[in-house]
Amino acid sequence: MHVEKSLVLTHGAVMAMLQAGIAKAEEMGQPQCIVIVDASGVALGQIRMTGAKYLSLKSAETKARTAASIRAPSDAIPEAVGPAIAAATDNAVTRLGGGLPILVDGTCVGGIGVGSGTAEQDKDVAHAALAAIGAEPE
């Protein structure tokens, strides 16, 4: 067959994820940058919360694209190959923690990247966003 059916993130899912991520970040007291991309890495939604680091928006986007591309957490890339992959992709791939794939029924429909806190804080916010739409945890 030349075509296949696929699952896609809706704008409603993106908004629900952003709202859940913001709520978690506010609960933690850590303003965050949150970026959600589709399975091909196209940004569908993003926010830089008041007080979040400006450059963290860039790293959050890279984390989201990395997670969507490798269908795994961004920090799953082995440390030994991280610099080479970053160089080979013109810094489009990172091994920084805080990027998670968005998995629905075993299918990767996108990625979420969070930045501005510690790697653990970033992951906590990403997990809250995934839970908002019933996506599978990493």
Image (tube, rainbow, N blue to C red):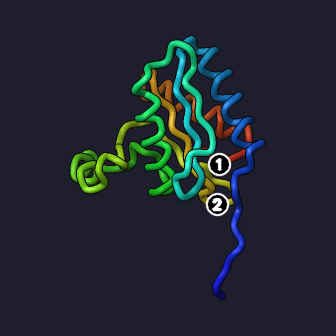
Which amino acid, mark 2?
Answer: Gly
Circle 2 Cα neighbour tier, 10 Å, few/some/many (<14 / 14–19 / ≥20): few
**Residue 99 in view here:** yes
| Residue 60 percent coordinates (x, y) | 47, 35
Residue at the right extreme, as displayed: 12
Which amino acid, mark 1?
Answer: Glu
| Residue 125 percent coordinates (x, y) | 58, 29
| Residue 48 percent coordinates (x, y) | 55, 24
Query: Quadrant of the image for the N terminus?
Result: bottom right
**Residue 138 in view here:** no
The residue nearer to you, when weighing 105 against 51, is 51
Circle 1 Cα neighbour tier, 10 Å, few/some/many (<14 / 14–19 / ≥20): some
Pointers 1 and 2 in contact (CB under 8 A)?
Answer: yes
| Residue 18 percent coordinates (x, y) | 66, 32
Element marked by disc 1 = loop
Element marked by disc 2 = loop
Splitting the image into 4 quarters, where does residue 39 fall?
A: bottom right
Precedes in sequence: disc 1 or disc 2: 2
Residue tagged 2:
106
The residue nearer to you, when weighing 131 against 3, is 3
Residue tagged 1:
136
User: Residue 77, relative to residue 56: is it above or below?
Assistant: below
Q: In the image, 116: left or right of 27?
A: left
